[in-house]
Image: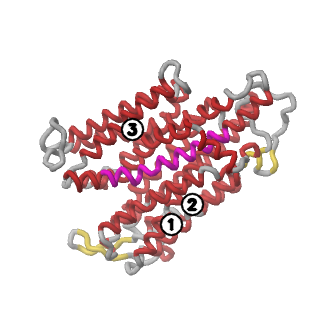
Amino acid sequence: MSSPANAPSARPRQGRLLTFWTPEDKHFWEREGEAVAKLNLWISVPALFLAFAIWQVWSVVAVNLPALGFKYSTNQLFWLAAAPALSGATLRIFYSFMVPIFGGRRWTALSTASLLVPAIGIGYAVQDNTTGYPTMLILALLCGLGGGNFSSSMANISFFFPKERKGSALGVNAGLGNLGVSVVQFLSPLVITAGVFGIFGGDPQIILKNGAETRVWAQNAAFIWVPWIAIASIAAWFGMHDIADAKASFAAQAAIFRRKHNWIMCLLYLGTFGSFIGFAAGFPLLIKSQFPAVNPLAYAWLGPLVGAVIRPFGGWLADKFGGARVTLWNFLAMALGVVGVLYFLPKGTGGHVMPFGPAEGSFAGFFIMFLVLFFTTGIGNGSTFSMIPAIFLKLKLREVHAADEAAQAAAIKEGNTEGAAALGFAGALGAYGGFFIPKSYGSSIAATGGPELALWIFSAFYVMCIVVTWWYYARRNAEMPC
């Protein structure tokens, strides 16, 4: 796309509002667009990182509540751990459409600041073991605010980059943001062992550990994020930009619900990100149930770390080789990875249906195969998210004549708007994997004595995703090659 003759030569801004933004114009991109886009990306990344940390903080807090004297049942603790996944996935549906309505800068700053509510609330609530269960459940649901932020963050960043850079940019934003899952699981057990906030952090609690009394500051698992959330909110408000052309009503964005490819990509993203967040949530429990002699907290954080770090590489691969091709082969690797996990499970469980593998199982093999699965979820997260904006842009451009520059420009704007909305909506449905995968493990164990049935279902689902990806996007003469 060539630079329009009437394009402004000076920086076209009104404060933090970009009134002229054409990243597909190579001259504009090289002259000033790239620098502005990267600034917004690097402010977005820590904000999203903090959102994931708050979203997953209950995976650590809930485990410690019995030792702190909270008289909650096992089922109640399960719901405290699961509630953020449910509320976060639901909030993502609404957050998907917020950026074009309110502006990316405003919404990023406000949604990041909203994380202060659950962070401060949990910090105070865990200091009093008479805190009622309804209060704790509300705080757990409020942690879903962090889960919701993903959809708006990805939608916002997608507006800043040209189509050949979207996969890499979205991969960086999501991949480094996803690190919050791993870091909160790694850091929380450390920060609760010291009064890092002095008199401002509250008194320690006394727990029994290995028969001896130990002082812990359970509130630090939440309080540790408060100053960083405040800094990130201020940085977003004063450092990021709103894009005037990104403005759109809900009605304009709701066009995605009439698009078949919106629902297809939701299915594929459920297979990638749903697996990532679901495996992350259920990994500690699965380790504990299948290998009781192993301390799950020593290993569980490594899986999400691998998946988060590799996600930008998945976006890069998609930009280089095509999102559909990378996604297709990645789902094949995921299906085989689940079979590898099944191979190394202990064979003593009542529900075991694998006719091969070591009878006593192998934790080393099990752990390595799960790292492979986390690796593939990261690749797939990046590749599927590179496909979505490309698909919606292509859909709109097909509707106009290539020689009509005005129609082409309007199609690009509408395609970017729908693509951003589809990114957010796919992220919303994909997040439900954070609830359904751990629940599937529990249901499988309750019904058959082992997790094998759930794992076989996961593998079959990945095979279905292979077929769908091949048919619609990867085969010769596919309906929407990308």
Pointer 2 with pointer 3, Cβ within 8 A:
no
Nearest to the observer: residue 103 or residue 421: 421
Tell me the CA gap for discs 2 and 1: 9 Å
Asked if the stretch drawn in magenta spans residue 425, the answer is: yes
- The disc labelled 2 sits on which kind of residue? Ile
Tell me the CA gap for discs 2 and 3: 28 Å
Pointer 2 with pointer 1, Cβ within 8 A:
yes
For the residue carrying disc 2, how many other residues have a C-alpha within 10 Å: few (<14), some (14-19), or many (20+)? many
- The disc labelled 3 sits on which kind of residue? Phe
Mark 2 = which residue? Answer: 229
Mark 3 = which residue? Answer: 375
Nearest to the observer: residue 217 or residue 89: 89
**Image quarter of the N terminus:** top right
Spot the residue most to the bottom.
Answer: 130
Magenta highlight range:
416-440
In the picture shown, does residue 71 fall above or below 64? below
